[in-house]
Amino acid sequence: MTAVIDKTVRTPGRWAAPPRPVWEEEPSRAGLAGKGIALSFACLAILFPLWIVLVTSLSSRKTIDEAGGLVMVPKGITFIAYRELLSGGQVTRAAVISVLITLVGTLFSMGVSVLCAYGLSRSGSFGHRWILMILLATMFFSAGLIPTYLLVQSLGLMDTYLALILPSAISVFNILVLRGFFMGISQELIDSARIDGAGDFRILWQIVMPLSRAVLAVITLFYAVGYWSAWFNASLYLNDQDMMPLQNVMIQLVQKQEAPVGLGQAIKTGQLSGLAVQMAVMVMALLPVAVLSPFVQKHFKKGMLTGAVKG
Amino acid sequence: MSHSTVPRSRAEADESGKTPVAPGGATGPQGKRSSGKLGLRVRLRRDRVLLLMTLPAVVIVLLFNYVPILGNVVAFQDYDPYVSDNGIVAIFHSPWVGLENFQRLFEDSAFWEAVRNTLVLFFLQLVLYFPIPIMLALLINSVVRPRIRAVSQAILYLPHFFSWVLVIAVFQQLFGGAGILSQLLRQHGYDGIDIMTDPETFKFLITAQSVWKDAGWGIIVFLAALASVNPDLYEAAAMDGANRWRRMWHVTLPALRPVIALLLVLRVGDALTVGFEQILLQRDAVGPGASEVLDTFVWWNGVRNQDFGYAAAAGLIKGVISLGLVLVANKVAHLMGEQGVYQK
């Protein structure tokens, strides 16, 4: 190639570096290598344990016995652990319960939060400062575990799934993030809809929400992850072991190393490895969030409350 | 849908011509509802739909955040949960004991151990955890290739979305008695080690788990601050002969200062809350001596031992001190010229 072609700008691929500003010095090789090593180390520290968990969950009993426990290098793939866990029984039931609580809870939380955020987002509206103060103040104190427990108990929510949804239904932080976003929507747009005869519900549904898809996606993810990951309220408010969601079953099976109900015999005698079963439960718990969160990733910044709250 | 007869906004006011508007609408805050001249009842009528929308959230917050505050009176009672089927009715039938629960607390060595563990964990996390997201953010920020940046961010954010149950289960596979570390040691003729049940190293284990779960997520706020730096500043600094490191010191780090101050304030205000779920999950494995913090102390005495009055007393002490810490931390932030959590 001639020198002329060298000077033309390459069309940058998505892996390629964008052009460097002229005033910036070329990075040294050592600097680049150092950065590469540090970044790779950070990423591997997260991925390596997940890899072991995934590979072991997909390994046969023979492979696991040969490896002496956890498997790092896969030798053949078998879905026996997943098949056994998902063919009805304790873990299947817990997974269904978790999915349902997450769906219902997230829908409820989003509905209440979006309504409240919009209701507070029109500056100058009646009473919005007072309501805002009531919500904000809760970020500075907590009533405490014992009084909350007594309240939930006396409301008759013990041993109901409402106890897993209502007390944790609202995050004031999420409402403030939504409100901050709604406030940024052009007032002219809302005014013109109002002139056309639209009421507040209709403006929220047809104008504000479609314009806020990104932040709605992030807050939905936050709420959904909250419900999916929750275990403490279930341990506090539910007594019936058959009602427990997936996280609580995971505590029993993985942390306390109990055999899953109904599979004990298969693990003792058959093809099924107890370790593979434990790892499969972990994969079931991490898969939904690992699959969904990267889709929303580029909007995460919008889920941050930046700057002080305006009145 | 009935139409309001009161101007709700500038645009409608323009239409009806009731409210004088500055020419071109250039002055005054955009979209501010004209509230000054209207009576309360008129405004209440105008905004009733908006108020109605906030109602469900307000009811839930009042019920689950404010009403339980009153329940703290059991801290001054010899609360007997069995005197009634209803936990709140039982309050009215339980004898008052004044400050007896607090007196018992101050003489209880387990309480002081919980206080000490809480403070030790707070300082350890402050020193070992806090700088890591800042360094990671600087590292990510210096990566210019968009794909590498996006992929590594996706990986670093991931553990934030894992439950504590899962994070601890993952650590168990790494450092537990049957974990990968023990497995490798045994294969090479050494004894396996079980870090997950060792009270001596527990505080470092807790910190490592927090770093693994949340340090990656913590970079977002710093990346946002870094993205808002005016690139001309870097160019000007480079023109003045500042090299890469000096530019970082004189341009990048000052840009991060407000965020760092705010996060420190938040962290100090939250000092007495150190990973309740995380520690509770591991309390059995390492024993309460090393792992009991204020929150788990409340849980153990209240939920497990049914000594509600005593537990509520410990919870109340924690709550009051925490509230004080938040307010003081904010004051300090304001004095430092930073914004803090709320504005003055």
Image: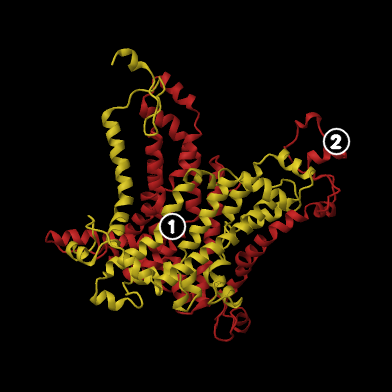
Chain colours: A yellow, B red
Q: Secondary structure at mark 2?
A: loop
Please give left or right for residue A136 compared with residue B315 in the image: right
Residue denoted by label 2: B20
Residue denoted by label 1: A288
Residue B309, compared with residue A275, is above or below; it is below
Rendered location of residue B18, percent (x, y): 88, 40
Q: Is residue B288 visible?
A: no
Q: How many marks?
A: 2
Given residues B291 and B159, the one toward you in this image is B159
Rendered location of residue B37, percent (x, y): 84, 45
Q: Secondary structure at mark 1?
A: helix
Rendered location of residue A71, percent (x, y): 23, 59
Given residues A100 and B191, the one toward you in this image is A100
Mark 1 chain: A
Callout 1 touching callout 2 (CB < 8 Å): no
Amino acid carrying mark 1 in the image? Pro
Front of the two marks 1 and 2: 1
Identity of the residue drawn at 41% across and 40% down: B150
Residue B8, compared with residue B65, is above or below; it is above
Mark 2 chain: B
Identity of the residue drawn at 57% across and 79% down: B77
Q: For marks 1 and 2, give the CA distance.
A: 55 Å
Asked which quadrant contains residue A37, the reply is top left
Given residues A279 and A62, the one toward you in this image is A62
Identity of the residue drawn at 46% across and 60% down: B273
Crowd band around label 1 with a 10 angstrom C-alpha radius: few (<14), some (14–19), many (20+): some
Given residues A211 and B82, the one toward you in this image is A211
Rendered location of residue B338, percent (x, y): 55, 41
Confirm whether circles 1 and 2 share one chain.
no
Q: Is residue A112 visible?
A: yes
Amino acid carrying mark 2 in the image? Pro
Q: Residue furthest bottom?
A: B83
